[in-house]
Image: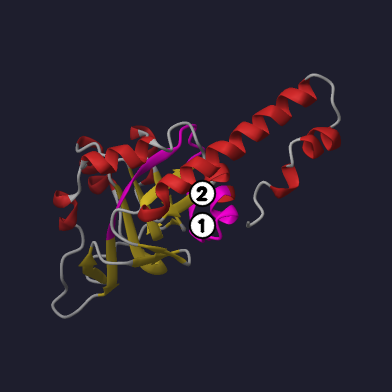
Amino acid sequence: MSAEDKELAALFEGLDTPGVSDAMDKLGLTGQCLGIAALDGYRKTVVGPAFTVRYVSASTPPGSVGDFIDDVAQGDVIVIDNDGRTDCTVWGDIMTQYAGARKIAATVIDGVCRDVAKALDDNYPIFSRGRFMRTGKDRVQVESVNAPVSIGTARVTARDIVVADANGVVIVPRDRAREVAAFARKIEETESQIRTHIADGMTLGDARAALGYHTLQRKS
């Protein structure tokens, strides 16, 4: 990753997707990936720049399905657009092993994965529409790399910041990352104060009113 990639990813350290999503709402941005779920109940949040891949139906003869991974940098999040297809996979155990060895941060798929036992055993984070055993070989092929893709209705361009955890996946536009992270931290600080107030015996309604909870996520 570049120095700027590392800097932008570090801005989201300690945050989670609900807080980032709220900040996106506050700023009038969309980026929540509908229908994309975590393979497991991950305890940590994954953050990294997007390496985008778009799959299309295979030609004759069929083209490549996974060689792009050799170009993915350590700490990147692979973001695969397979047009939401659930009839064939674009990710399996060999890809999981190789991605883990190369210290790739995670994989997000608008589609399905397979060989999930390997991903779970290796604790390699995958976020997808589900799982299915049928191979994508000869059914789909890579059409483009690091071009804009669509993941669960969210647009993703190369090097956008991906934030993913057990709640789902949020895509933060790279040029708004600093702004989104700053708002997310403000929201988290306010919610932390609310939790402190209710622990001290204040009613939830009074705590929320005192700290303006109902306007936290409202677009300015």
Against 134, residue 106 (above or below) is above
* Left/right of residue 11 with respect to residue 98 in the rendered view: right
Residue displayed at 48% across by 58% down: 31
Against 83, residue 93 (above or below) is above
User: Which disc is residue 214 wearing?
Assistant: none
* Left/right of residue 61 with respect to residue 117 in the rendered view: left
**Magenta residues (range):** 23-52
Q: Position of residue 197 (x, y in %)?
A: 77, 25
The image's colour scheme reads secondary structure
Compare marks 2 and 1 and give the one earlier in the sequence. Answer: 1
Which amino acid is tagged 1? Answer: Gln
Instruction: Report the residue marked by disc 1.
Output: 32
Q: Which mark's residue is nearer the viewer, 2 or 1?
A: 1
Which quarter shows the C terminus?
Answer: bottom right
SS label for mark 1: loop
Give the number of marks.
2
> Which residue is nearer to you in this view: 105 or 38?
105
Q: Position of residue 216 (x, y in %)?
A: 67, 46
Queried whether the magenta region covers residue 209, the answer comes back as no
